[in-house]
Image: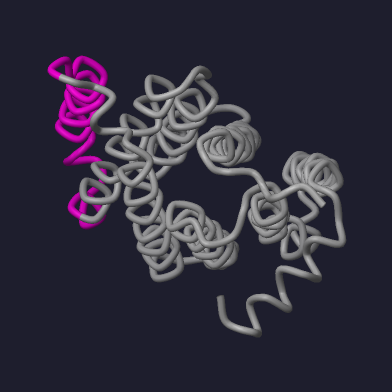
């Protein structure tokens, strides 16, 4: 690890893992309140902070030098950038945010593969098949309503369901289903968002998107953490 990264880790490690999670819970509550009450100015702080706080928790919870942790941590940083991009209005901002989230999904997928998620399915690929069928059916149903956004949404959502399927595989590698639940919640969050893009205005959609997204990222982090070596005891 390079000296700058060592310095950063040493500073982050001054804060306990539980404190990072508590801070995340507080900021998520602030974010949801801002969504519900329409305090958009607050969201420029609260929304990008969510994945940064989870990154802090991940850094102090696992031993350094593990490739899956680096990939997943980088994904959290990209998610922060994506969350910021989606605070802007317009199609360009939406496509930028979706592109960044696609990069995040690819990094999560790489991390899960290194943790053996694909091998966990063995000869049975029921979960990936179900996710793929869900993706194909949904994209077919929404294609015309999505208009020029149909192709990029199809590519992104394919990465999304691949991530979710592999997250489910993590629970088969070791006891626990938190990562799989997190992956499923991520699909739900983006499904609600995608339905809005397709013209279906669901009541409370913004609040539902952020609550499921926050829970998804948290469960994915906790699930991945359980598959990594903890830091050495001092």
Q: Main secondary structure of the magenta part?
A: helix
Compared with 128, 64 (above or below) is: below
The answer to whether one can see residue 9 in this image is: yes
Q: Position of residue 116 (x, y in %)?
A: 32, 36
Q: Nearer the viewer, residue 55 or 114?
A: 114
Q: Quadrant of the N terminus?
A: bottom right
Q: Nearer the viewer, residue 78 or 111?
A: 111
When asked about the image quadrant of residue 48, the answer is bottom right
Compared with 102, 197 (above or below) is: above
Residue at 39%, 35% (x, y): give it: 195
Q: How many marks?
A: 0
Residue at 58%, 62% (x, y): give it: 80
Residue range corresponding to the magenta coloring:
123-151
Q: Is residue 132 magenta?
A: yes
Q: Is residue 23 magenta?
A: no
Q: Position of residue 124 (x, y in %)?
A: 16, 15
Q: Is residue 207 left or right of residue 195?
A: right
When asked about the image quadrant of residue 94, the answer is bottom left
Q: Position of residue 110 (x, y in %)?
A: 32, 51
**Most extreme residue toward the bottom, as rendered?**
3
Residue at 32%, 54% (x, y): give it: 106
Q: Is residue 209 left or right of residue 45?
A: left
Q: Nearer the viewer, residue 228 or 86?
A: 228
Q: Position of residue 35 (x, y in %)?
A: 72, 45
Compared with 175, 82 (above or below) is: below
The answer to whether one can see residue 37 in this image is: no
Q: Is residue 109 left or right of residue 62?
A: left
């Amino acid at each position: 690890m390079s000296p700058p990264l060592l310095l950063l880790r040493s500073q982050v490690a001054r804060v306990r893992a539980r404190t990072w999670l508590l801070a995340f819970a507080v900021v998520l509550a602030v974010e949801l309140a801002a969504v519900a009450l329409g305090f958009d100015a607050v969201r420029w702080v609260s929304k990008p902070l969510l994945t940064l706080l989870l990154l802090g928790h991940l850094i102090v919870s696992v031993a350094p030098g593990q490739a899956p942790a680096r990939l997943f941590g980088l994904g959290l940083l990209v998610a922060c950038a994506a969350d910021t991009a989606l605070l802007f209005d317009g199609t360009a901002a939406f496509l930028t945010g979706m592109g960044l989230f696609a990069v995040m999904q690819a990094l999560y997928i790489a991390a899960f593969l290194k943790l053996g998620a694909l091998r966990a399915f063995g000869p049975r690929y029921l979960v990936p098949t179900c996710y793929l069928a869900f993706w194909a059916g949904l994209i077919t149903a929404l294609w015309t309503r999505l208009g020029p956004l149909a192709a990029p949404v199809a590519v992104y959502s394919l990465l999304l369901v691949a991530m979710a399927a592999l997250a489910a595989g993590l629970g088969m590698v070791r006891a626990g289903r938190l990562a799989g639940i997190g992956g499923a919640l991520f699909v739900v969050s983006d499904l609600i968002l995608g339905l809005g893009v397709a013209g279906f205005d669901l009541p409370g959609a913004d609040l539902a998107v952020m609550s499921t997204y926050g829970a998804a990222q948290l469960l994915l982090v906790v699930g991945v953490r359980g598959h990594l070596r903890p830091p050495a005891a001092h």
